[in-house]
Every structure is written in C-alpha cells, then in structure tokens.
Image (cartoon, helix red, strand yellow):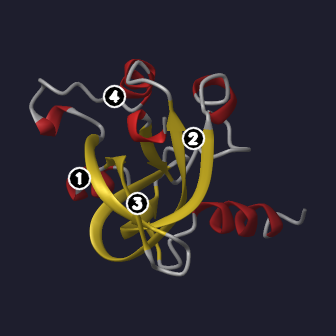
Amino acid sequence: MSENLIHIFVYGTLKPGECNYQRYCAPRVVQERLAIAEGQLFHLSLGYPGMTEGVGWVSGVILSFPNPSIFEDLDCLEDYQPHRPPEQNEYQRQEIQTYTPDKHPLKVAWVYWMNPAKIQQYQGVYLPDGNWNSHIKSKKSSKGR
C-alpha cells in the first residue's frame, strides 16, 4: 500500500500541531514521519515560513496520503497552479529527496518551495537551524511568556 501513497514534506503551518494541519491534513493523513530535506528556511513577514533550494537542512515531517486529491486543497492554500507561470505562484510544488533526521536517504516527497524573489518580497529572515518551530517558540518566549 505504501507504494501508492502521496508523500509531502511539510516544514511550517502544515506540520502536526500547527495551525493548518487540522483543517487540511488531519482528516486524510495515514502516516507521519520526522524528516529533513536539503534547503534553506525563512520566516516571512506574513507569519509563515518559506523554503528555498540551497545549502543547509530544513526540519519537517513527511505526511503520507492515500491519493492525490490532497493536492487540490494544498495547491489552493499554497497559491500554486501548475499551469500558471512560476512567477505568478506563491510556491512551486516539486519532488525532492528527503532524509531521516540523521541524514540517511528516506524517500522522494513533494514539497512547496518558494522562489528567492518571493522570499525577498516578503522580507524573509533566514533561519540557519532550518527549524520553524524553534523560531516560533523563541519568538513567544522573548515576549515574556
């Protein structure tokens, strides 16, 4: 069965426990696995992250779904239309190699990338540890909470 699953690497608001997981993923996800992927992560002025290709590691989760209908909702959320010129999309959907947290190859999964021009447009702040959750937690603790 796992041969037919759709695997998506998520690194921000679609991760379990984050604001978009319950609405978009929880009802349909059949497997979750911690993973990392090569790239760079940025916190955007809009309050969510964007990942680009680059040197570094991004922490996330591979969510597995039973069929490709999940793309209808996620493409809408991520403002991605496959037939639209790339510069008109907020994110691009692409397959990438993922790895276990200790950097052993895992599986190919889909990811929503953001192009560097969009990162700059949204005043992206580079997160060198590649972990959006640790950035969010540090922002909350610096507010005196």
Task: Kindly state the secondary structure of the residue where label 1 is placed.
Answer: loop
Disc on res. 87: none
For the residues bearing labels 1 and 3, Cβ distance under 8 angstroms: no
Q: CA distance from mark 4 to mark 1?
A: 13 Å
Q: Quadrant of residue 141?
A: bottom right
Which is nearer the eye, 106 or 138?
A: 106
Which is nearer the eye, 76 or 72?
A: 72
Residue 6 on image: x %, y %: 41, 36
Residue 41 in the figure: left or right of residue 117: right
Residue ID for mark 2: 14
Q: Earlier in the sequence, mark 3 or mark 4?
A: 4
* Residue at screen point 21% across, 54% down: 117
* Residue at screen point 60% across, 32% down: 29
Q: Earlier in the sequence, mark 1 or mark 3?
A: 1
For the residues bearing labels 4 and 1, Cβ distance under 8 angstroms: no
Residue ID for mark 1: 115
Residue 126 on image: x %, y %: 43, 71
Look at label 2 and name its amino acid: Leu
Task: Kindly state the secondary structure of the residue where label 3 is placed.
Answer: loop
Look at label 4 and name its amino acid: Asp
**Image height check: is 114 above or below 71?**
below
Task: Kindly state the secondary structure of the residue where label 4 is placed.
Answer: loop
Q: CA distance from mark 2 to mark 3?
A: 19 Å
Look at label 3 and name its amino acid: Gly
Look at label 1 and name its amino acid: Asn
Q: Earlier in the sequence, mark 2 or mark 3?
A: 2
Residue ID for mark 4: 79
Residue ID for mark 3: 124
Residue 87 on image: x %, y %: 14, 39
